[in-house]
Amino acid sequence: MRVGKREGDNASPVGEFPLRSAFYRPDRVMRPCTSLSLAPVRRNDGWCDAPTDRNYNRPVRHPYSASAERMWRSDGQYDLIVILGHNDCPRIRGRGSAVFLHVARPGLTPTEGCIALEREHLRRLLAAVRRRTLIRIAP
């Protein structure tokens, strides 16, 4: 965890962040119950992580001309995703992008800066949160 989050530092940002919206992969999981804005992930969905691009830290469609993370993944980590309100209003170049709450890898191994939970725990959390729920990431 890091107070001064930077792009590519592999650290989760320290602070309190709103839960903006959620996505689910419809071919792998049932639509979760949640009060958050919810949409299915599509094969060409991406999230721009190129600090110099005009769409930095925003959703994009692949193919995309700048660096952009693929949201449709084979490893299951993005079967359920919550978009955290980190560095989005205002967006500051290089302060971190694509900070999500998502499904953990087996063994709960570290992420590249996101927060990861076991699939069933994330599903339960999605059902419990409200539109004004905040997540606090503390050092």
Image (cartoon, rainbow, N blue to C red):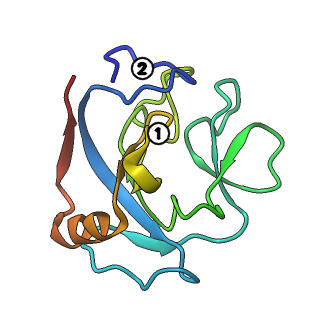
* SS category of the residue bearing label 1: loop
Residue 38 appears left or right of 45: left
Identity, as a three-letter code, of the amino acid under mark 2: Lys
Identify the image quadrant of the N terminus.
Answer: top left
Residue 36 located left or right of residue 71: left
Rendered position, 111 above or below 46: above
Between 34 and 27, the residue placed more toward the observer is 27
At label 1, the amino acid type is Thr
Determine the residue positioned at 57% across, 70% down. Answer: 41
Residue carrying label 2: 5
| Secondary structure state at the residue bearing disc 2 | loop
- The residue depicted at 34 percent of the width and 60 percent of the height is 118
- Disc 2 to disc 1, C-alpha distance: 14 Å
Q: Residue furthest front?
A: 107
Label 1 belongs to which residue? Answer: 111
* In this view, 6 is above or below 120: above
Measuring from the top left, give residue 19's x and y in whole percent: 29, 52
Q: Where is residue 87 in the image (x, y as percent from the top left)?
A: 42, 31
Where's residue 45, x and y in %?
66, 61
Between discs 2 and 1, the one toward the N terminus? 2
Residue lying at 69% horizontally and 24% vertically, measured from the top left: 52
Specify whether 6 is left or right of 44: left
Mark 2 and 1 residues: CB-CB less than 8 Å, in contact? no
Question: How far from the left and from the top, in percent, is residue 93?
Answer: 56, 22
